[in-house]
Amino acid sequence: MKWPKAIVRAALVMGLSLAVPSFAQGGDDILQSAIANGVIGEKIDGYMGFAQTPPPPVKTAVDALNIRRRAAYTAEAAKRGVTVEEWAVAVGCKTLASRVQDGQFYALTDGKWQKKNGSIALPSTCG
């Protein structure tokens, strides 16, 4: 699905003040370790995903984080009059552009996991 550039641009301009979740909210050690070890990473759709098969505690932590993210995206999308998916992708674009560090994994629209080494070539839908 192609996301309206206007939504992504608006999200980037407004700085996503309330809606950009941190990688591992609250500094959760399980998530931080899984990110560092390449087990999980950020996806363009605004959610965490599994670059490798995770152990059960990591899967549980990612699932819980994604539930919190979805709730935040739902609230913010309603305020802005856009779909949850549109807002989640806008946040995903911002997250990939500004929070994924070299050596960490991420996935774009093709779903293939890549290890960041320099800048990420974001799709045109990210504005």
Image (cartoon, rainbow, N blue to C red):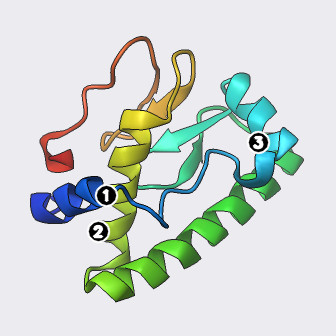
The number of numbered discs placed on residues in the rendered structure image is: 3
In the picture of the structure, the residue carrying the numbered disc 2 is 86
Do tag 3 and tag 2 residues touch (Cβ < 8 Å)?
no
- Alpha carbon separation for disc pair 1 and 2: 6 Å
As drawn, 59 above or below 98:
below
Q: Quadrant of residue 5?
A: bottom left
User: What SS does tag 2 mark?
Assistant: helix
**Amino acid, disc 2:** Glu
Q: Quadrant of residue 111?
A: top left
What residue is at 33 percent from the left and 19 percent from the top?
119
**Amino acid, disc 1:** Ala
Q: Quadrant of residue 89?
A: bottom left
Picture coordinates of residue 58 (x, y %)?
A: 80, 46
- Alpha carbon separation for disc pair 1 and 3: 22 Å
Picture coordinates of residue 15 (x, y %)?
A: 35, 55
In front: 81, or 31?
Answer: 81
- Alpha carbon separation for disc pair 3 and 2: 25 Å
In the picture of the structure, the residue carrying the numbered disc 1 is 90
Q: Residues within 10 Å of mark 1 (few under 14, many from 20)?
A: many
- Residue 36, which numbered label? none
Do tag 1 and tag 2 residues touch (Cβ < 8 Å)?
yes
Picture coordinates of residue 19 (x, y %)?
A: 47, 65
Sequence-wise, which precedes: disc 1 or disc 3? Answer: 3
The answer to whether residue 1 shows anywhere in this view is no
In the picture of the structure, the residue carrying the numbered disc 3 is 31
The answer to whether residue 23 shows anywhere in this view is yes
**Amino acid, disc 3:** Leu
As drawn, 51 above or below 73:
above
What residue is at 15 percent from the left and 58 percent from the top?
2
As drawn, 10 above or below 103:
below
Q: Residues within 10 Å of mark 3 (few under 14, many from 20)?
A: many
User: What SS does tag 1 mark?
Assistant: helix
